[in-house]
Amino acid sequence: MAKHVAGPLRQTVGRLCYRTEISVMEVLAVLLVLLCAGYVVGSGIAVVRAAGHRGDRAYSAVLGAACAALTLYAGTCLLWGVHFWTDSFQDQSGITAQPVAQEDLLAVTQYFADKTAEAADDVSRDAEGLFDVPREDILSASTTVYDVLEQEFPFLEFDDPGVKAMAFSRLMSIMDFTGVYCAWTGESNVNVDSPACLLPATVAHELAHQRGIASEQECNFLGVLASTTSGNPAYVYAGWLSGYIYLGNALYRVDPESYWAIRNAMPDTVKADLAYNNAYWAQFQDSVVQTVSNQVYDGLLKAYGDERGIQSYGTVVDLLVAYYRDLAQEKP
């Protein structure tokens, strides 16, 4: 179903939607909101006017809304949900998440910190030392990000159409989203309001979804791996930085002293990018919209069989350690 029906159907629709630079997903989302508002208002008026039959009219309105919602959910399950039940990246690659020993976590975190430091000087920076690669350049380079990785994992081969910048990016930040893949339109959409230093890794993450990889933790892993092997300096830096953040957060929970030793040894440019990224996201922390958004998305992931929900994002650490452990141990 996923390989022979859902995938080809999404790709066909996607080719049509990619004929315009505008995010068709956003257009449909706006229309859906307007339609829902119109339905609520229209149904309310109809109930008021249905003297003597208001109960029946209200029931019909609720039933109609429920049928529409179930239709949308069923369509989403057909186009995307089936991928949660097919062979995952771990199944196809043989790279599996395993319990991580603390010494391995420390070694791989140090490895990523060193790689991040090495890549930090290869990207453009502004007068304050912050990452300053134009977002347009990042998006235009997205079609070749997976070229190298596809050679290592042929099952990832895909003709990338690129990604689209979202007009409502600020709203996405408020909702705690850096990108979204829309199965209904076959589009990869990214938030271009959030700090650009991690945008390339987000792009690579969304392009992993294009390949039928549904698991968020696997897409996070692929976002790091594709970026660091892409050969594009902006993507390479973002990939190492993104991986360092995942690993560093995990290391901090078990060994704060080692975490700070590694963090304090980072170049000032990397520290500046990390501080800017943290400050940006801090302004949205614990907002009502963010809380509701996370709860809804957590429920959606669990409905698809991902028992850890949004906490599954932590599994990326297990995958990173499994893949990079030997390289980290070889590094002098």
Image (tube, rainbow, N blue to C red):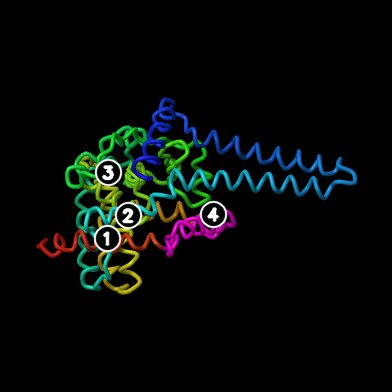
Q: Upstream in the sequence, badge 4 or badge 1?
A: 4
Dot label at residue 218: 2
Q: Amino acid at mark 4?
A: Ser
Q: Kindly report the distance in space between the C-alpha atoms of the residues bearing marks 1 and 3.
A: 20 Å
- The answer to whether one can see residue 127 in this image is no
Q: Looking at this view, is 140 or 26 the one in front?
A: 26
Give the mark, 2 or 1, whose residue is nearer the N terminus: 2
- Please give the name of the residue rendered at 31% of the width and 53% of the height, measured from the top-left corner: 87
Q: Decide which of tag 4 and tag 3 comes sooner along the chain.
A: 3
Q: Residues within 10 Å of mark 3 (few under 14, many from 20)?
A: many
Which quadrant would residue 133 be assigned to in this image? Answer: top left
CA gap, disc 3 to disc 2?
Answer: 18 Å
* Camera-side residue of 144 and 216: 216
For label 2, the SS is helix
Q: Earlier in the sequence, mark 3 or mark 2?
A: 2
Q: Amino acid at mark 3?
A: Tyr
Q: In the displayed structure, does residue 48 sit left or right of residue 162?
A: right
Q: Give the magenta range.
A: 284-311
